[in-house]
Amino acid sequence: MKNIVLIGFMGVGKGSVAREVVKHSHYITVDTDDLIESMENKKIKTIFEEDGEKYFRNLEKNIAKWLESSVKNTLISTGGGFYKQENLKKIGTIVLLDSSFDAIIKRIKEHPNAVKKLKKRPLLSNLKEAEKLYNERRPHYLRLADIVVDVTDKSAQDCAKELLKKVKKHA
Ligand code: S3P
């Protein structure tokens, strides 16, 4: 089984879909933000505050190299900026979770842990800036994706099922 690399904007539901994929398949899952947090023993938010975004991006680069050389049979959920890694395509099949910006913000705001979800993401603190970032990134996400799953108005479970079906077809 080739790795699956889940990309997409902050809050689109990568973590939720990854958990559902694991329930319905033999994949195991890792999350690049979780790997970084345990490596540094700090929250992402604290890394941004104390060490800066450049430092964080360098950690992502190290993780990308490690994923390429050492990780197999895994669904890799990535941070929204991880798509920039040069070796992304070498890590596995790229699956984009796609959604409009408004639907993403609606999804976060409706979540029972909305405040926490917004707080832990430094790049979502200013919604105007975040929308700009979304518009900059979306064409790149689409260009890189081998598979696109539109998550609008779908449960994580349905997205996971669609993802697995499309991955099987793509192989
Ligand atoms: C980021 C997304 C975050 C996290 C960091 C930067 C980004 O991950 O990696 O705050 O640049 O889009 P999520 O996409 O899981 O929120």
Image (tube, rainbow, N blue to C red):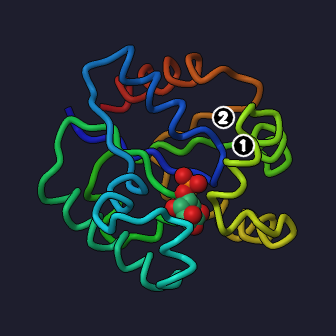
Residue drawn where x is 67% and y is 48% of the image: 117
Q: Check the image and report above or below for 68 versus 163.
A: below
The kind of residue on which mark 2 rests is Asp
- The answer to whether 83 appears left or right of 25 in the picture is right
Q: Which of the 4 quarters of the picture holds residue 158?
A: top right
Query: Which residue is identified by label 1?
Result: 99
Residue drawn where x is 32% and y is 36% of the image: 29
Where residue 77 appears, as percent x and y from the top left, is: 42, 45
Quadrant where the N terminus is found in the figure: top left
The kind of residue on which mark 1 rests is Ser
Residue 129: numbered disc: none
Are discs 2 and 1 less than 8 Å apart at CB? yes
Instruction: Rate crowding at label 1 as few (under 14), some (14 to 19) or many (20 or more) other CA atoms within 10 Å.
Output: some
Where residue 38 appears, as percent x and y from the top left, is: 32, 58
Query: Which residue is identified by label 2?
Result: 150
Where residue 75 appears, as percent x and y from the top left, is: 33, 38
Residue drawn where x is 54% and y is 31% of the image: 16
Instruction: Rate crowding at label 2 as few (under 14), some (14 to 19) or many (20 or more) other CA atoms within 10 Å.
Output: some
User: Is residue 43 visible to us here?
Assistant: yes
Quadrant where the C terminus is found in the figure: top left
Q: Which of the 4 quarters of the picture holds residue 120?
A: bottom right
Q: Check the image and report above or below for 21 versus 118.
A: above
Q: Nearer the viewer, residue 49 or 18?
A: 49
- The answer to whether 156 appears left or right of 94 in the picture is right
Label 2 and label 1: CA atoms lie apart by: 6 Å
Element at label 2? strand
Q: Earlier in the sequence, mark 2 or mark 1?
A: 1
Element at label 1? loop
Please tell me in which quarter of the rendered image ligand 1 is found.
bottom right
